[in-house]
Image (cartoon, rainbow, N blue to C red):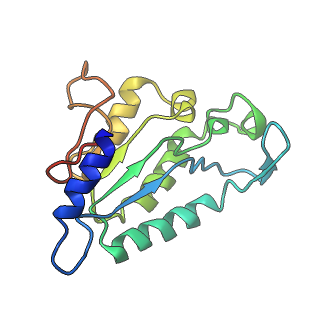
């Protein structure tokens, strides 16, 4: 019950007015691609690739408004089709990886707090490890994806937003 003990300790540290110690945003599977809406491979759900930029911008606006301390981005910023190897990507004259990434990064740059990135499988369809580090380990923006900027730093890390809390 370690998690429960930490929660209890955090509850004891709440501000006198009952405010939470901190709040954070979370987002996953943006999977942006400049391609028409389509169903997933199983045909069970509709993917709206282009609209994810507006949804991301709404999330950023909300996090800024609520005063989140940080954001956790759980991977798949852009869709694998951007690399040009399958789906709509087969019709691209050239891979759209960099263009797609810049569009999503543009929406995320409005975030007024640090973003802690995780790597999803779609990042790996589009980038090598060095390219991911170059794009997502951006201390001037408060973005983190690896333990450090060193070329051999692992792509895992921990972050402590408050005493007693570790992500």
In the picture as drawn, the residue positioned furthest to the bottom comes out as 17
Question: Left or right: where does residue 9 sit relative to residue 86?
Answer: left
In the rendered view of the protein, which quadrant contains the C terminus? top left
Q: Nearer the viewer, residue 16 or 83?
A: 16
Question: Left or right: where does residue 163 sit relative to residue 30?
Answer: left
For the point 56% across and 51% down, the residue is 30
Q: Nearer the viewer, residue 55 or 36?
A: 55
Residue 141 is situated, as x and y percent measured from the top left of the image, at: 26, 53
Q: Is residue 108 above or below residue 91?
A: below
For the point 32% across and 29% down, the residue is 156
Q: Is residue 144 above or below residue 63?
A: above
Q: Total label count?
A: 0
| Quadrant position of residue 21 | bottom left
Q: Is residue 108 above or below residue 42?
A: below
Residue 157 is situated, as x and y percent measured from the top left of the image, at: 27, 33
| Quadrant position of residue 153 | top left
For the point 66% across and 58% down, the residue is 50
Residue 131 is situated, as x and y percent measured from the top left of the image, at: 40, 30
In the picture as drawn, the residue positioned furthest to the top comes out as 152
| Quadrant position of residue 89 | top right
Question: Left or right: where does residue 50 sit relative to residue 156?
Answer: right
In the picture as drawn, the residue positioned furthest to the right comes out as 43
Q: Is residue 103 above or below residue 124?
A: below
For the point 26% across and 62% down, the residue is 69
In the rendered view of the protein, which quadrant contains the N terminus? top left
Residue 162 is situated, as x and y percent measured from the top left of the image, at: 17, 54
């Amino acid at each position: 019950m370690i998690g429960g003990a930490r929660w209890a300790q955090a509850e004891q540290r709440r501000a006198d007015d009952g405010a939470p110690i901190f709040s954070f945003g979370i987002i996953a599977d943006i999977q942006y691609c400049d391609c028409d809406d389509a169903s997933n491979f199983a045909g069970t759900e509709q993917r709206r690739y282009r609209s994810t930029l507006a949804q991301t911008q709404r999330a950023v606006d909300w996090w800024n408004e609520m005063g989140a301390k940080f954001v956790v981005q759980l991977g798949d910023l852009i869709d694998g089709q951007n690399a040009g190897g399958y789906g709509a990507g087969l019709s691209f004259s050239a891979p759209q990886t960099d263009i797609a990434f810049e569009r999503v990064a543009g929406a995320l740059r409005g975030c007024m707090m640090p973003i802690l990135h995780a790597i999803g499988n779609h990042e790996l369809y589009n980038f090598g490890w060095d390219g991911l580090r170059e794009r997502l380990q951006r201390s001037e923006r408060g973005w983190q994806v690896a333990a450090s900027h060193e070329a051999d730093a692992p792509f895992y890390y921990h972050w402590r937003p408050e005493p007693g809390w570790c992500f």
